[in-house]
Image: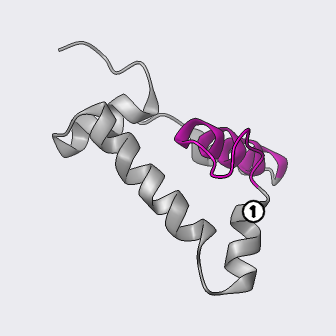
Amino acid sequence: MEKPKTLFERLARQRGISVEEMRSIISARIEQGMNDPDPVKRASWERIPRAGDIPTPEEWLRYAVEQLEAEGRGDLLRWYPNL
């Protein structure tokens, strides 16, 4: 079996779905966060740099990784090949 090249491929494979389905799930969660009724939660989603109105899954992932690294939590980004 070929090793996944992206996080989205890995997540999709773990769930037995296509990469596009995985991206759709992530996109729906991002949109839900951007429209959260709680202004504090919504503001945290609004901080994600993006080209359009709603961050893409790739924009969200880039931001999440940058935040973890900035907070000194890069250890959470470790790849666990057997998971």
Residue lying farthest to the bottom in this orientation? 38
Residue drawn 71% across and 45% down? 63
Residue drawn 67% across and 38% down? 62
- Please identify the quadrant where the N terminus is shown: top left
Residue drawn 77% across and 72% down? 43
Q: Magenta span has 69?
A: yes
Expressed as whole percent of the image width and height from the top left, the position of residue 18 reads: 23, 34
Q: Which residues are magenta?
A: 48-70
The picture quadrant where one finds residue 58 is top right
Q: Magenta span has 13?
A: no
Q: Mark 1: few, some, or many residues within 10 Å (few <14, many ≥20)?
A: some
Residue lying farthest to the front in this orientation? 53
- Please identify the quadrant where the C terminus is shown: top left
Residue drawn 34% across and 33% down? 10
Q: Look at the image and name its color scheme.
A: one colour
Residue at disc 1, secondary structure: helix
- Asked if residue 36 can be seen in this view, the reply is yes
Question: Mainly helix, strand or loop, the magenta region?
Answer: helix
Expressed as whole percent of the image width and height from the top left, the position of residue 39 reads: 73, 84
Expressed as whole percent of the image width and height from the top left, the position of residue 9 reads: 35, 29
Residue lying farthest to the right in this orientation? 70
Residue at image mark 1: 46
Up-down relation of residue 49 to residue 35 (above or below)? above
The picture quadrant where one finds residue 37 is bottom right
User: How many tags in the picture?
Assistant: 1
Is 79 situated left or right of 62 in this image? Answer: left
Viewer-side residue, 21 vs 65: 21
Is 53 situated left or right of 70 in this image? Answer: left
Viewer-side residue, 55 vs 5: 55
Is 12 situated left or right of 44 in this image? Answer: left
Amino acid, disc 1: Glu
- Asked if residue 82 can be seen in this view, the reply is no
